[in-house]
Image (tube, rainbow, N blue to C red):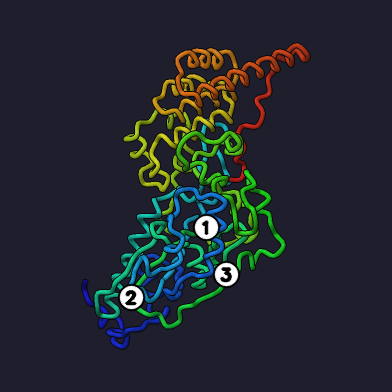
């Protein structure tokens, strides 16, 4: 590691302790506009919340050992301080795109956090660069660990304790400048930061009586301010493995990744500054993927199209499953041949999703495809999905016939085109 500390500030070089004033210029150099710090002592106040969360059901994305989530020194035994950073991602262009869904096309929607480059890579590189500059500043090789969704730490609580922002009733950390449209990261270092904070938890302290986020949640996943049943959150549902539970399919609307509702309805997110980071310049196709094109992609083609995005890590099959559900919610008869192909998929979650979608779309073509698929289906869960889809499609045809007999119009109302009016995360 190069030692350039003396070139920056001879008074700092060789010191065992730093202040945030020493570090902020370095953070700005590497593209981190918002930083704070806390000490590396255990987060004992998390014991009960983590136990309650466990009781509600983990998603499987969390670190399994709660004790290790509470002690930063499990992650870095030499840690003395934790630098926290908020990286804003919602640009002015991203905010505009989020409001202007191309409803005339067969397109899905995603959360605005995947509009730009994969934040895991961008953020990790910047935190690593910051660690290297801190080493140069103090004139020695420091011990450090970078945490961007990769450590046992509870990122939002670490950020809250450091004074980086506050946690709202939607469970998001709010930056005073950027609102909740920020990624969170942490840098554990073996350097003491003299003005590090150690603030107590205070969920919703700036929310007042407002509970719009909780009431607007499409699946009513919040059980209390700042607490939710994570497996019911649509952001999780779009990333989960297997067959999507029926209760969450219609609430998904046309979402293929994430959900932003609890952020979009929040008054605290109004009139906040937008990110100006070129890494998060929105990609139009990532924001509103062409659902039919998505169904036709190989994994290689998917990575070529979306590999720079944070939604690429799950692979094309998960997105195709979500696209099938979205097409079912859109109820467009022209989608039937594209959906029906997946009744022959080697993946049961894709066959089940295709069957459900065809049942929602309805019509003679959908019924014919479903009956043909039922003959050779061996998976009990998928057979049930096909049988239920046949009943649903047949019922729609009867209703359409009754309506035509009553009105003579020949028009069959396809209903809501899939919801998702207020976002995708």
Residue shown at 70% from the left, 17% from the top: 399
Q: Categorize mark 1 by other alpha carbons within 10 Å: few (<14), some (14-19), many (20+).
A: many
Answer with mark 2 or mark 3, whichever residue precedes in sequence.
2
Which mark lies nearer to you, 2 or 1? 2
Q: Which mark is residue 380?
A: none
Report if residue 270 is visible in the image.
Answer: no
Horizontal and vertical percent position of residue 156 = 50, 63
Q: In this view, which residue lies farthest toward the left? A: 2
Left or right relative to 182: residue 14: left
Vertical side of 198 occupied by 279: above or below? above
Answer with mark 2 or mark 1, whichever residue precedes in sequence.
1
Residue beneath label 2, please?
190
Residue beneath label 1, please?
181
Horizontal and vertical percent position of residue 414 = 65, 25
Left or right relative to 409: residue 388: left
User: As rendered, which of 17 and 222 lies closer to the eye?
Assistant: 222
Q: Which mark is residue 201?
A: 3
The reply to whether discs 3 and 1 touch (Cβ–Cβ < 8 Å) is no
Q: Secondary structure at mark 1?
A: loop
Q: Splitting the image into 4 quarters, where does residue 272 fall?
A: bottom right
Which mark lies nearer to you, 3 or 1? 3
Left or right relative to 406: residue 220: left
User: As rendered, which of 256 and 29 lies closer to the eye?
Assistant: 256
């Amino acid at each position: 590691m190069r030692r350039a500390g003396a070139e920056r500030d001879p008074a700092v070089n060789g010191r065992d302790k730093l202040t945030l004033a020493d570090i902020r210029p370095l953070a700005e150099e590497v593209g981190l506009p918002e930083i704070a710090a806390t000490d590396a002592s255990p987060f004992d106040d998390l014991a009960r919340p983590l136990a309650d969360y466990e009781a509600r059901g983990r998603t499987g994305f969390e670190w399994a050992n709660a004790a290790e989530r509470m002690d930063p020194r499990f992650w870095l035994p030499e840690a003395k301080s934790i630098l926290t950073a908020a990286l804003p991602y919602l640009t002015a262009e991203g905010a505009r795109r989020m409001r202007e869904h191309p409803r005339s096309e067969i397109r899905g929607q995603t959360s605005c956090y995947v509009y730009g480059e994969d934040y895991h890579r961008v953020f990790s590189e910047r935190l690593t660069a910051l660690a290297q500059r801190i080493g140069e500043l103090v004139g020695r090789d420091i011990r450090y660990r970078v945490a961007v969704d990769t450590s046992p730490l509870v990122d939002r609580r670490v950020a809250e304790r450091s004074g980086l922002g506050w946690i709202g009733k939607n469970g998001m950390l709010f930056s005073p400048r950027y609102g909740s449209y920020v990624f969170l990261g942490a840098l554990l270092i073996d350097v003491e930061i003299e003005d590090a904070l150690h603030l107590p938890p205070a969920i919703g302290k700036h929310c007042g009586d407002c509970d719009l986020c909780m009431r607007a949640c499409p699946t009513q996943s919040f059980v209390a301010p700042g607490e939710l049943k994570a497996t019911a959150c649509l952001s999780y549902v779009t990333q989960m493995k297997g067959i999507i539970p029926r209760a969450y399919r219609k609430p998904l609307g046309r979402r293929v990744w994430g959900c932003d509702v609890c952020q979009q309805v929040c008054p605290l997110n109004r009139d906040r500054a937008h990110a100006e980071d070129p890494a998060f310049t929105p990609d139009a196709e990532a924001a509103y993927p062409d659902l039919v094109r998505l169904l036709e992609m190989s994994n290689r083609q998917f990575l070529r199209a979306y590999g720079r995005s944070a939604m690429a890590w799950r692979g094309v099959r998960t997105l195709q499953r979500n696209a099938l559900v979205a097409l079912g919610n859109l109820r467009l008869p022209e989608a039937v041949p594209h959906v029906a192909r997946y009744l022959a998929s080697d993946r049961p979650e894709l066959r089940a999703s295709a069957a459900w979608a065809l049942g929602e779309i309805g019509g003679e073509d959908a019924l014919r495809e479903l009956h043909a698929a039922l003959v050779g289906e061996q998976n009990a869960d998928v057979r049930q999905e096909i049988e239920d889809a046949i009943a649903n499609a047949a019922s729609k045809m009867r209703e359409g016939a009754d309506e035509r007999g009553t009105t003579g119009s020949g028009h069959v109302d396809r209903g809501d085109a899939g919801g998702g009016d207020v976002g995708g995360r």
